[in-house]
Amino acid sequence: MASTYTTKLRLELQTDGENSSTWGQKANDVYERLELAIAGYTAIAMSDANTTLSTGNSETGDDQASSNVIKLTGTLTANRNIVVPSYAGKWIFWNATTGGFSLVVKTSAGTGVTLANAKIQGIFSDASETYAFTPPISSAGVIALDTELDAIA
């Protein structure tokens, strides 16, 4: 029986007795994937278009969606979508693009969370929609309260 992969972090689950001479490297691949999910940082240079985060099984290495923190750079001429995988997960996104436009972090079918230019935001997905879970923070480290919160204070 061949290895399978977990659905969220795409960690390799080895079958008993499989990979007798290569299990050490395969285990290291899993540990690196766990480290990426807990403390990983990925910078994505966007073209001026919507972007879907890449995913891949543990040995492929091309997996933007497994990173804990994702910084988005590039010059935008319009608001753009960042599409996350359709599974429950959480990320911290940083909109470091230029051009003054927002990013909408969403699943392929969801409505999404708008991330203003120069803001950092924690985002959670329940597999169909995305939700903000921390106040937006400016890239200078200042909490950026929206107008609804300002009106309450």
Image (cartoon, rainbow, N blue to C red):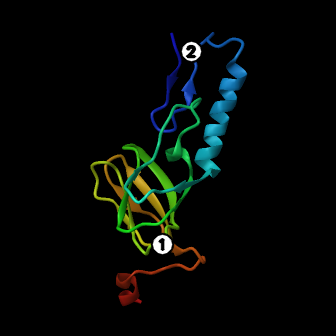
Label total for image? 2
Which amino acid, mark 2?
Answer: Thr
Q: Position of residue 78 (x, y in %)?
A: 35, 68
What residue is rendered at 43% in x and 75% in y?
Answer: 100
Residue denoted by label 2: 15
Residue 121 in sight = yes
Please rate how many residues cluster around mark 2, counting C-alpha atoms within 10 Å: few if below 14, some from 14 to 19, many from 20.
few
Relative placement, left or right, of 20 versus 65 is: right
Residue 83 in sight = no
What residue is rendered at 31% in x and 48% in y?
Answer: 108
Give the secondary structure at mark 1.
Answer: loop
Q: Earlier in the sequence, mark 1 or mark 2?
A: 2
Give the secondary structure at mark 2.
Answer: loop
Say if 134 sits above or below 35 in the image. Answer: below
Say if 64 sits above or below 130 in the image. Answer: above
> Foreground: 65 or 78?
78
Relative placement, left or right, of 88 versus 57 is: left
Q: Position of residue 36 (x, y in %)?
A: 62, 45
Please rate how many residues cluster around mark 1, counting C-alpha atoms within 10 Å: few if below 14, some from 14 to 19, many from 20.
many
Foreground disc of the pair 1, 2: 1
Residue denoted by label 1: 136
| In contact (CB < 8 Å): disc 1 and disc 2 | no
Say if 50 sits above or below 135 in the image. Answer: above
Which amino acid, mark 1?
Answer: Pro
Say if 14 sits above or below 78 in the image. Answer: above
> Foreground: 30 or 94?
94
